[in-house]
Amino acid sequence: MVSDDTSPLLRAKAYDQPSVFQPANLLREGRRQRSRPDVPVPAVCLLDPDGDIVRYLTASGQATEHPGWACYHTTLWTFDLDGTDVGVIGCAVGASFAVLLAEQLAVSGCELLVSVTSSGSITPAAEPPYFVIIDRALRDEGTSHHYLPPGTWSHAPAHLVALLDGQLNGLSQLVVTGSTWTTDAPYRETTEAIAHAESLGIIAVEMEAAALYAFSAVCEHDVICVAHVTNTMATEGDDFEKGEADGAHAALEVLAAVIERLRIDQFER
């Protein structure tokens, strides 16, 4: 049994104390070093772990680099999606990286963060590819334990799930609501671990949602995570097929529907 006696992951967490290292201070120094202006990011931002959406938008000339983004690790692109200015960061793979960016975006003007991540099928809800609005994620990663005390699940903001559940119909790919398993180690998805996830009714496995939802709960920031179920973990042939433009068209269609459903006119600039 994992406890603070057996794992440093659970030691000296002091959940009620603020962090000494603050994202706003890092970005301040990044702007100073790079001579970048203090310009807010769009109120709606997207994390694109696979990078396919960013590659599609930049290749088609639809995206512009944000002038003030001073993160040392990434480029923030902006684009227009049906009248809403959206910021997007590509290749934000894994829980710790995703939350690092979520923290920085939150202090830079982002009000709604959406993550759309390619995921492996556990308990199929349909034939891939399809999307899952993640309502809760199994905390089989480390980052969430720095935000919340130990527990089984991280939950999406209830008010967002209530607006989205069963409401994203008529799109080119199916959208369902359900739970996922967030792992730090994709190449340790063993038969036993998969069977455990199946026993919990988990639809898919991904690498970010549990941590992003823990950040959301503690920092009171709106986050919604979407799993794009595209594969069976390469156990069969013809895997990882996401659709046209490597799934970018379908993912942007889902993002547009999420924005419309949440009635976030205040995010339009």
Image (cartoon, helix red, strand yellow):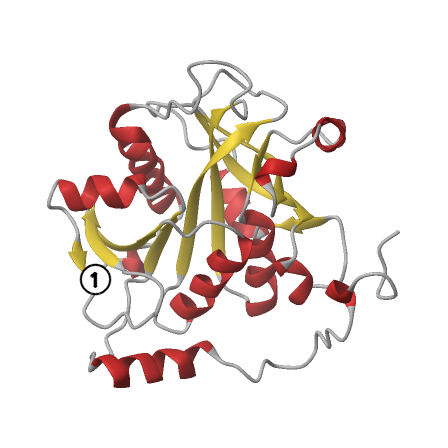
The residue depicted at 28 percent of the width and 67 percent of the height is 41
Please determine whether, in this image, residue 45 is positioned above or below residue 227.
below
Extreme residue toward the left, this view: 61
Callout 1: helix, strand or loop? loop
Quadrant into which the C terminus falls? bottom left
Q: Is residue 173 left or right of residue 161?
A: left
Horizontal and vertical percent for residue 53?
Answer: 28, 41
Whether residue 192 sits left or right of residue 269 in the image: it is: right
Badge 1 amino acid: Arg
Q: Quadrant of residue 89?
A: bottom left
Q: Where residue 254 sits in the image (x, y, percent)?
A: 36, 36
On screen, 166 above or below 49?
above
Q: Nearer the viewer, residue 43 or 148?
A: 148
Classify residue 266 as left or right of residue 182.
left
Is residue 170 shown left or right of residue 155? left
Choose top left, top right, bottom left or bottom right for residue 232. Answer: top right
**Residue 156 versus residue 70 in the image, above or below:** above
Residue density around tag 1, few if under 14, some if 14–19, many if 20 or more, within 10 Å: few
Q: Which residue is mark 1?
A: 269
Which residue is located at x 54 percent, y 29 percent? 120
**Residue 234 picture location, percent across and down:** 51, 22
Depicted 192 relative to depicted 212: above or below: above
Q: Nearer the viewer, residue 7 or 217?
A: 7
Which residue appears at 34% of the width and 35% of the height?
251
Residue at figure coordinates x 70%, y 48% from the top left: 153
